[in-house]
Image (spheres, rainbow, N blue to C red):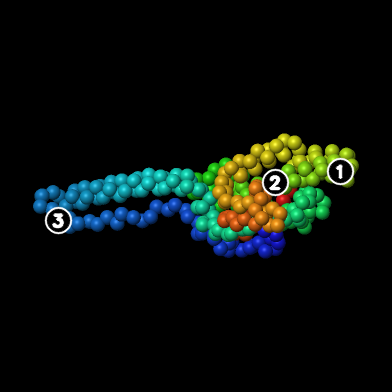
Amino acid sequence: MAGIRYDQAADSESASFLRESEDPKLPARGAVRRNGTSSHIAVPRCLAYTALLFMFVNFVTLIAILHIVSLDGQLHERIESGLSETLFGKIPKSTVVFKPDKTFNVDPFGPDSLEGPWNNLSPYGKGHIRVENPSALGLSGGFPLDDSKHGPEEYTISMFHQLHCLAAIQSKMSRLLDWYHDTNDKEYLKFSLNQEHMSDDHIYHCVDYIRQSIMCSGDTTLEKARAGENGKPARGVDGWDVVHECPSFDAIFQFAAAHRSRNITGIQ
Ligand SMILES: *[C@@H]1O[C@H](CO)[C@@H](O)[C@H](O)[C@H]1NC(C)=O
């Protein structure tokens, strides 16, 4: 997962898995065929035509109403079956082998981390994206990006919020450990732990939020026994060298950058 940088982020709107927007439109359906209008009943012609026209209009209206009702049903079904697919299209899968990576053992919000591995997990825009037509996707409640009633809104891709939260926990932990190991003075600690993203409230929020994110992801990969002495399997797991199948991080990263609602960077 290392080595992902902003400058790779697709600035164009060409994220490969991006599907054309799917605004539900009323298809021009129900081409109604008019059969011969010759009548055996002696009715004035214009009256017959008027009656036919009336029936025709009613018929078309009925078809239109039925159609709107069924479209509404489809929309609800789509939301229940995973709303984001409507926006993202089918996200490609990638196989990832979990490996230990000590480069992440740093303070993600620390002064040395601007170019660090944690920051490289945050796309250009920080995972905040612009959704042009939220109501067509059944979305509401995003931050409005202009004054129009059904205009574009800002939403945040959860994965990047999750990573930000994990980074905050790691940051607080590493600062507390620095202090514990006497490599940080208490004044700096007080200052740094009172910063917005490091307050106790934010950290507890993050733990609660990540707990629910992990439970939601339901990764059922089966992990093998860890390597013990002489490479023999030992009782227990460490999770390393196990293959997982994941929605492609790179694809989501590219999508986030291409659809960013703000030109901001960084994991903090
Ligand atoms: C972000 O920067 C690009 C140019 O790099 C500019 O076209 C765009 O308007 C900016 N977007 C915002 C939201 O400021």
Can residue 125 be seen in this snapshot?
no
Q: Give amino acid for label 1.
A: His
Frontmost of labels 1 and 3 is: 1
Judged by depth in the image, the label closer to the viewer, 3 or 2, is 2
Please tell me which of labels 3 and 2 falls first in the chain.
Answer: 3
Residue 166 is situated, as x and y percent measured from the top left of the image, at: 70, 46
Determine which residue is flagged by label 2: 166
Q: How far, Cα to Cα, is label 3 from label 2?
A: 77 Å
Residue beneath the point at 47% across and 53% down: 23
Q: Residue at x 19, y 57 (%)?
A: 35
> Is the residue marked by circle 3 packed among few (<14), some (14-19), or many (20+) residues within 10 Å?
few
Which of the pair 50/173 is nearer the observer? 173
Rendered image: mark on residue 213: none
x and y, in percent, of residue 108 in the image:
76, 50
Residue at image location 15% in from the left, 50% down from the top: 44
Q: Residues within 10 Å of mark 2 (few under 14, many from 20)?
A: some
Q: Please tell me in which quadrant of the rendered image residue 195 appears.
A: top right
Residue 81, image x, y percentages: 47, 47
Q: What residue is shown at x 53% (from left), y 48% (from top)?
A: 134
Q: Does dot 2 land on a helix, a strand or a loop?
A: helix
Question: Dots 2 and 1: beta carbons under 8 Å?
Answer: no
Question: At label 2, which amino acid type do we have?
Answer: Leu
Upstream in sequence: badge 2 or badge 1: 2
Residue 73 sits above or below residue 10 on the image: above
CB contact under 8 Å: marks 3 and 2: no
What residue sits right under mark 1 in the picture?
A: 181
> Relative to the observer, which residue lies in front, 198 or 26?
198
Question: Is residue 106 visible in the rendered structure shown here?
Answer: yes
Disc 3 target residue: 38
Residue 43 horizontal side relative to residue 140, left or right = left
